Amino acid sequence: MKLSDETYERIERYLLQEMTTEEAAAFEATCQADPDLAAALAHEKKIHLLIRIHNQNQIRQQVRALDTAARQPRIIPFRRMALTVGSIAAILLVAIGYWWLGGSAELTGGQMAQEAEKAFAAILDPSLRGKLATAEDSLGYYLNQEAWAEATLYYLAMPDSLQARAKPRLMAAQAYYAQSDYPQADSLSLLAMGAPATATSEVPCKAKLLRVLILLRRDQFAEAKALIGYTPGEDAWKKKWECLKTQQFDALEKLDKDLSKKLP
Amino acid sequence: MSLPQDPELVRMILSGGKGLNKAVALMHQHLKSMVHQHITHNSGRAEDADDIFAESMVALVQNVLDGKFRGESSIRTYLKSIAHHKWLNRLRAKRPTVAFEDHMAELEDPAFADMEDLPSDERLAKLVDGLMQQIDPQCNKFFHLRYWCKQRMEQVAVNMGFKNAQIAKNKHQKCLKKLRELLDGNENLKDILGGMVA
């Protein structure tokens, strides 16, 4: 059965109720007399239903994504990130330390991550959102608003170097993390971790902490332990924990370097 | 951002695309707690409330697009009525006699009793979405604006940046051809849809 585009247009107008009452009645009469047209109408009804179901699914998915996002912690401006990430780190590392010290062997990675998330949500300050000062603040603001196009523009406006994009990458990683997009958050935090440790040595350390959190959320417990630098039989990680807890990022970096020299 | 007035919300829904997404996000932000409270105060769990809210949003948007929402009540009341009936139907499916704790007489609109309830089962959703994913995103936008939001081709052409309606129409026909081919190649889905339109 091969029908013309004009016939399909008539069917479309009928199904979308764009015909007048008289036109619709005439169309129905033609359908009764023409089995090909009737079959095409039945087929087009399926097409319309298919599109209807698909679009309804899209709304369902959007609402569910909004539910998930509402339950997730929100990102915060970068100026407060030191406090935020430092606090998360402290809580996280207390939990990790407690577990490693054998205080609660039954604590799972998922439970630890949940605790860290709760703490993360509790220390966010929504009143700080939207106060623009620098391009980085603007990027943070747009990420916060989930205005991805604007955020991308600000991101691309920054010099394309590992150093210059380290902070934006960390912010974007945090935004993805808030959206539960852990693969994206992971790859961006990994890039931010790789930034040269000069004046912004805080960034790689914070990115590392975020990665620990991401790994825990993905139940990659062994990787999280490895990332934090846990070495059985040594207590160097305890010093690192102290540095993180007190936000002595430069000292932490030095410890990291010393530890890496010891590796075979 | 505060919840816009009802006429503006309706305009956003009818505009489709980003406008519709924004309207859904704003209604989620401002009206979710109302539905949540209603369901959880009437023996529902938080998951039930999430589910009922999602289904009510789908119904609300669909009714606005179908011209069934005429503004006789506010969107807020309308959404609550839909949620109320959906929850009542679900409870009645489990227990034939159900009494609500709070007085909801104003929501007992018989118009909702036989409300269209397209199945939201995951198998069908997967089949449909799997097929639609094989379609060019531009075609999907065509279908979204023309068939779901019921926009005239002239308006679709403007919204999609085509020079005129004829160019948009030609493109639309190509997209439809592709979709017909895909559906013809999927007997399973064709049968399910056939059963639903019959």
Image (spheres, coloured by chain):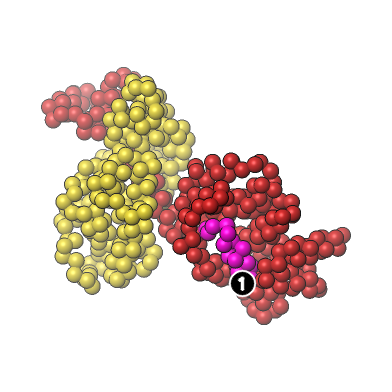
Please determine whether, in this image, residue A234 is positioned above or below residue B52: below
Label 1, residues with CA under 10 Å away: few <14, some 14-19, many ≥20: some
Q: Colour of chain B?
A: yellow
Q: Is residue A111 visible?
A: yes
Report the chain shown in red.
A
Closer-to-camera residue (A77/B83): A77
State the residue at coordinates (37%, 47%).
B22
Quadrant occupied by the C terminus of chain B: top left
Closer-to-camera residue (B148/A131): A131
Q: Position of residue B115 (x, y in %)?
A: 22, 51
State the residue at coordinates (81%, 72%).
A234
Quadrant occupied by the N terminus of chain B: bottom left
Q: Position of residue A42 (x, y in %)?
A: 28, 32
Q: Is residue A78 magenta?
A: yes
Q: Secondary structure at mark 1?
A: helix
Furthest toward the front, the residue is A133
Horizontal side of A97 relative to B173 (left or right) equals right
Please determine whether, in this image, residue B160 is positioned above or below residue B13: above
Q: Is residue B119 visible?
A: no
Q: Which residues are magenta?
A: A75-91
Q: Position of residue A80 (x, y in %)?
A: 57, 62
Q: Chain of mark 1?
A: A
Q: Callout 1, which amino acid? A: Ile
Closer-to-camera residue (A196/A101): A196
Q: Quadrant of residue B42?
A: bottom left
Residue that label 1 marks: A91
